[in-house]
Amino acid sequence: MEDWWDEVWKTLEAEFADIGDTAQMTRITVRLLMAAILGGILGFEREHKGKAAGVRTHMLVALGAALFVLVPQTSGAESDAMSRVLQGVIAGIGFLGAGTILKNQQGDESHVKGLTTAAGLWMTAAIGVAVGLGKEATALLSTILALAIFSVMPYVVRMFEKDVDKNDHL
């Protein structure tokens, strides 16, 4: 019976031996946490504005994208294999984004809603990929730029719309 337990224990050790040392454990932990945090920052902004995809969605998209590239990278995947992984992530997030886009018919006009949310999820996945590949500074800069686009651009657009309205009355 003791041999059986030894075999079970050795099998369990082998199953959980994918993280080789403390440095690798730290690297994986930092990357996954950073992906989740950066995704959460963008998700918080979207949720605060009452959009469909909020904190949890953005965190999961960034975390999932990071994990999709981190696992093959730490397993020693070649660049052609990593290229296929990236293609899959990009295509997959496109389907998720497509689910957030709605087209409403209102009289003679049709309104499309959710394009910014879809683009934000796509950007969040790209940020997760960057973090997963170890490009944390690039991911942080991209998050700041995306946050600026989400936050500042609506004011800029309104400013131009007011100028157009003023010129229409002249």
Image (cartoon, rainbow, N blue to C red):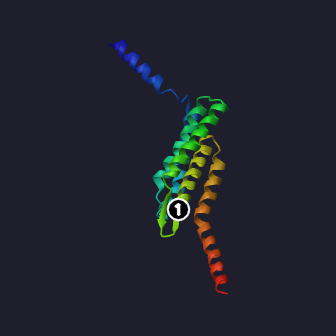
Residue 163: x %, y % from top left = 66, 79
Q: Position of residue 19 (x, y in %)?
A: 53, 30
Depth check, front residue: 77 or 122: 122
The image shows residue 167 at horizontal and vertical percentages of 67, 82
Name of the residue lying farthest toward the bottom: 170
Q: Nearer the viewer, residue 112 or 160?
A: 112
Helix, strand or loop at mark 1:
strand
Q: Residue at x 58, y 32 (%)?
A: 72
Q: Spot the residue most to the front.
A: 108
**Residue 132 appears in view:** yes
Name the quadrant of the C terminus.
bottom right
Q: Which residue: 46% across, 58% down? A: 52
Q: Is there any visible trace of residue 31 in the rendered image? A: no
Residue at 52% in and 47% down: 95
Q: Is residue 44 above or below residue 1?
A: below
Q: What residue sits right under mark 1 in the picture?
A: 112
Residue 88 is situated, as x and y percent measured from the top left of the image, at: 57, 39
- The residue located at (54%, 43%) in the rendering is 92
Front residue of 35 and 26: 35
On the image, which quarter does residue 3 sit in? top left
10 Å neighbourhood of mark 1: few (<14), some, or many (≥20)? few
Q: Which of the image's four quarters has the N terminus?
A: top left
Q: Amino acid at mark 1?
A: Val
Above-or-below relation of 70 to 17:
below
Q: How many marks?
A: 1
Q: Is residue 160 left or right of residue 101?
A: right
